[in-house]
Image (cartoon, grey):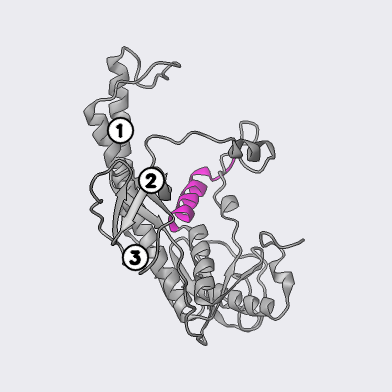
Amino acid sequence: MRLLQKFFKKESDYPTFKSRRDNQSCSYMPNAFAFREGKLTLAKHETPLDICWSRPFPKGATPSSVTVTRTTGGKFYISLLTEEDVSPLPKVKGEVGVDLNTSEIVCSNGKRYATPLKLQVLEQRKRRYQRACRRKVAAAKVSMGLSRNAKLSKGVKLPVSNNLRKAYWKVGRVTEHAANVRKDWQHKLTTSIVRENQTIAMESLYVRGMTASAKGSADKPGSNVKAKSGLNRSVLNAGFGEIARQLEYKAVWAGRTVVKIDRWYPSSKRCSSCGYVLKSLSLSTRQWVCPDCGQSHDRDLNASINILMAGKAILAGADGLRIHEVGYPA
């Protein structure tokens, strides 16, 4: 009901049902579980669950709710919600600008965090498993007397064999593996940045616009659709939005300051030494020389330095550098 109300207010898209192939979860309120001596027993269960804890549960804390999740790979996870006081970290002198790229995250202090190569291997494996699923689906259609590419009419169910279920399970397992690799890299990256720096500056990126399709329409077909599709996949694979979200909430916990600059700020085209701004700079150009002062620049490192300087200017009162930030008054 709440989602329909948001849809009619034009605050979200029309709600859709959850797919049975996605992660499945259910939540338990305090009257549906018992937590005694570090052991959890759910409703209609006679014995406590055998849980492998990822970290020690806070002493004296009581969970207010429990969520059980079954992933697409067939694994079960339990999340316990509780309140805990987080102490801020000691203050440090470090300041850093963060430039987000599809291949690596570059910081103004010279540190670079490359995206895991394992993600590319898992993506290729996932495609191979998906092709196997499509072949088995086509074979099932042929067994029904239909063509391989025929669309099923409404009410007609496809016979699902055990081999097809195994193929779907393989896709889910490799998808879950890739998600875990990505989360592990993101958390280690953001935790390292927050611990080492007191001020963190980054761009206010519009990820949804960056990953929009270039296909166009029948009247106005798009250009470079395949290249744009690959770029969209790389942006989503790196998880720019999740990295920004983690930096923000971890900075609040640690007593750090995160500042976002305007997404249209020419951080890559501006010389960090003299301030000269190039008229154009292609995405394939990774090194360039300032025509004014002759300084040689690494594109990403130069951008991160400019982001840091712009962030410090915003903290000093230059609000014009953040006019495109979400929630900032125009």
Q: Which residue is tagged 3?
A: 57
- The residue lying at 52 percent from left, 62 percent from top is 245
Q: Position of residue 97 (x, y in %)?
A: 55, 75
Q: Which residue is tagged 1?
A: 133
Q: Which residue is tagged 2?
A: 32
Q: Position of residue 263 (x, y in %)?
A: 64, 63
Q: Say if residue 99 shows up in the picture.
A: yes
Q: Say if residue 288 shows up in the picture.
A: no
Distance from label 1 to label 3 (Cα)? 41 Å
Report the span colored magenta: 222-238
Left or right of residue 88, residue 132 in this image: left
N-terminal of the pair, mark 3 or mark 2, is 2
Q: Secondary structure at mark 3?
A: loop
Query: Looking at the image, which is closer to me, 127 or 69?
Result: 69
Q: Of tags 2 and 1, which is closer to the observer?
A: 2
Q: Quadrant of the C terminus?
A: bottom right
Q: Is residue 102 depicted above or below 212 in this figure? A: below
Looking at numbered disc 3 in the image, what kind of residue is underneath it? Phe
